[in-house]
Each structure stands twice: as structure tokens, then as C-alpha cells.
């Protein structure tokens, strides 16, 4: 399912949106969006911080932009529902330890069945990633290295989880995360090699890597599932520099190293 949709960019910023006072009803609704159940109920998610809001304001349909009273950024497009509130109320809305001065509430784009037959290119595939910070960091890393589509198993954490969104640092506006049956995805694209990071894999620094293919990253604790391992055409390993090393690399760090080698 394609979970990112581009909305028309506003071109007239000269006319300011009317600033409204945030009601208690909206405060309660927006403050509940840290819960997956409530995000599904209302079809909304939040983005916090002035830079992240500026990076995403043209990528999603805004339900509201909320500012601390007296702090309205100049980049807010004409016609955006704009609210102001106090510092205490912003603290109730925020999922951060230090509440921002600006946050946005966006509508979650309608889910569209993903086309699982894809053109040649480099894609990241996530198999059961559970930590929202890891997911957001991988999205941000893919954006840096010019990978704009991520496929994720249906049991991967929600990209609209506030911690996932925050970790993307605005890259959620550029990188599509498509939730699907990844076994079916790999089977429908036999022409693309499937790479996966496994302990028994070949040294990634000594392998010849294709410009195209799927890079599979597995669950933080269990790694790549057995079903997906069977489909890996070239297992890769990131070797430690010495015998005295930690048990494993964080999956988002491993993803960054792996993607960097492909882009090399």
C-alpha cells in the first residue's frame, strides 16, 4: 500500500490564514494521535518542529497547524487551518520531551494497493522492523542516498507513529513506504537480485554489487525471517574490525553502511 501522496503546492502566501484559538475538543483529539488506534480512528498523524513542518507542509493535506501563541511561521500556506495555543497545551499535544513551538496535524493519505512489479532500481525492503526510531532513521538514510521507495512487511511498525515521523526529520515527505507481502514482492520481480544482511553472508566490502536490486533488512532481534531468507540471492555480511566487538549492529546503522556500499 502506497502511504505517501503528493498534494498541490500552494503558490500564494501573501494572504495570511486566519488564526483561531485551539478548542478543548480539538486539543483532546490531536493529543490522542500518539496512539495507533486513534490515528486509525481519525485518519490523522502529527509532525513536530518548525523545520519538519516546513519540509512536509506541501506533501500532505493539513488538518491543522498549531503554534504557540504569538509564533506563526511565515511559510504556512494560504488557507491552512491555523490555530494558536499556550505552552502548557502544546506540552499536552507533543510527543517530545521538549514541546516545539509549531506542529502540524495531517490527514493520513488514502492507502492504494502497491504495484508489486517494479522497474529496475535499488529498493530497501524491511522485514518486521519494530522500533519506530529505526524505521524513521532508515527513511532518512534512504532519502540521503537517493532511494525513494521502501517496501515493508505488514508487521513493520507504522511509519506514522510519532517517533517514526520525528526520526525521518522531514524525509517522510520524500520517501514512500509501501506495506505489502514482501515474499510476493520478491517473487514478482525475478529479474532483480535480492540482497540480505546475514551472519553467514559474504564480506560486503569485497563483493561486486549491482546497481539494481532489493536490500532486505531484518527484525532487530530475529533478523530476516526464514521465509524471506529463502529468496535471498546474495547474502551479505558487515564484518567487524576485531574480535572484541558488540553482539550486533543496530539495524538502522547496518542499513546505512549497506546502502552506502551500493552507492559507492
Image (cartoon, rainbow, N blue to C red):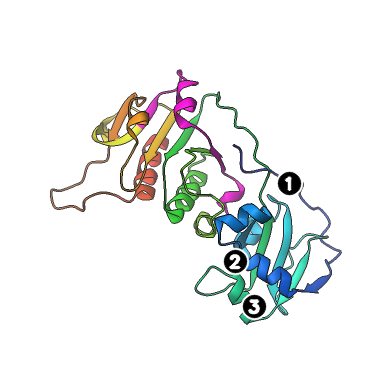
Which is nearer the N-term, disc 1 or disc 2?
A: 1
Question: Is the residue under label 2 in contact with that under label 1 (CB below 8 Å)?
Answer: no
**Badge 3: few (under 14), some or many (20 or more) residues near its Cα, within 10 Å?**
some
Query: Residue 177 lies in magenta, yes or no?
Result: yes
Place of residue 86 in the rendered image (x, y in percent of width and height, measured from the top left): 67, 81
Residue ID at (52%, 34%): 180
Q: Which residues are magenta?
A: 170-195
What label does residue 260 carry, if any? none
Relative horizontal placement of residue 104, taking residue 144 as reference (left or right): right
Q: CA distance from mark 1 to mark 2?
A: 20 Å
Say which residue label 3 marks.
Answer: 89
Callout 3: SS = helix
Say which residue label 2 marks.
Answer: 49
Q: Give whichever of 94, 201 is nearer the camera.
A: 94
Query: Residue 224 lies in magenta, yes or no?
Result: no
Question: Is the residue under label 2 in contact with that under label 3 (CB below 8 Å)?
Answer: no
Which is nearer the N-term, disc 3 or disc 1?
A: 1
Disc 3 vs disc 2: which is toward the camera?
3
Q: CA distance from mark 3 to mark 1?
A: 29 Å
What label does residue 7 carry, if any? 1
Q: Is residue 79 visible?
A: yes
Callout 2: SS = loop
Question: Is the residue under label 1 in contact with that under label 3 (CB below 8 Å)?
Answer: no
Amino acid at each position: 500500500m502506497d502511504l505517501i501522496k503528493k498534494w498541490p503546492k500552494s503558490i500564494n502566501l501573501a494572504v495570511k490564514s486566519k488564526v483561531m484559538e485551539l478548542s478543548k475538543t480539538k486539543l483532546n483529539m490531536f493529543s490522542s494521535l500518539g496512539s495507533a488506534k486513534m490515528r486509525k480512528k481519525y485518519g490523522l498523524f502529527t509532525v513536530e518542529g518548525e523545520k519538519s513542518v516546513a519540509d512536509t507542509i506541501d506533501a500532505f493535506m493539513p488538518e491543522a497547524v498549531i503554534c504557540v501563541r504569538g509564533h506563526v511561521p511565515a511559510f504556512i500556506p494560504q488557507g491552512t487551518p491555523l490555530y494558536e495555543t499556550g505552552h502548557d497545551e502544546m506540552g499536552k499535544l507533543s510527543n517530545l520531551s521538549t514541546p516545539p513551538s509549531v506542529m502540524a496535524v495531517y490527514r493520513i493519505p488514502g492507502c492504494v494497493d502497491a504495484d508489486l512489479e517494479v522497474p529496475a532500481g535499488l529498493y530497501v525492503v524491511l522485514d518486521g522492523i519494530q522500533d519506530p526510531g529505526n524505521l524513521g532513521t532508515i527513511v532518512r538514510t534512504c532519502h540521503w542516498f537517493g532511494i525513494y521507495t521502501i517496501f515493508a512487511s505488514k508487521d513493520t511498525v507504522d511509519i506514522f507513529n510519532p517517533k517514526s515521523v520525528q526520526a525521518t526529520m522531514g524525509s517522510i515527505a520524500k520517501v514512500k513506504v509501501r506495506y505489502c507481502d514482501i515474499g510476493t514482492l520478491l517473487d514478482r520481480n525475478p529479474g532483480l537480485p535480492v540482497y540480505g544482511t546475514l551472519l553467514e553472508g559474504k564480506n560486503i566490502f569485497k563483493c561486486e554489487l549491482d546497481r539494481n536490486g532489493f536490500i532486505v533488512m531484518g527484525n532487530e532481534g530475529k533478523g530476516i525471517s526464514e521465509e524471506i531468507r529463502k529468496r535471498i540471492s546474495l547474502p551479505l555480511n558487515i564484518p567487524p574490525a576485531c574480535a572484541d566487538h558488540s553482539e550486533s549492529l543496530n539495524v538502522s546503522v547496518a542499513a546505512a553502511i549497506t546502502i552506502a556500499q551500493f552507492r559507492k
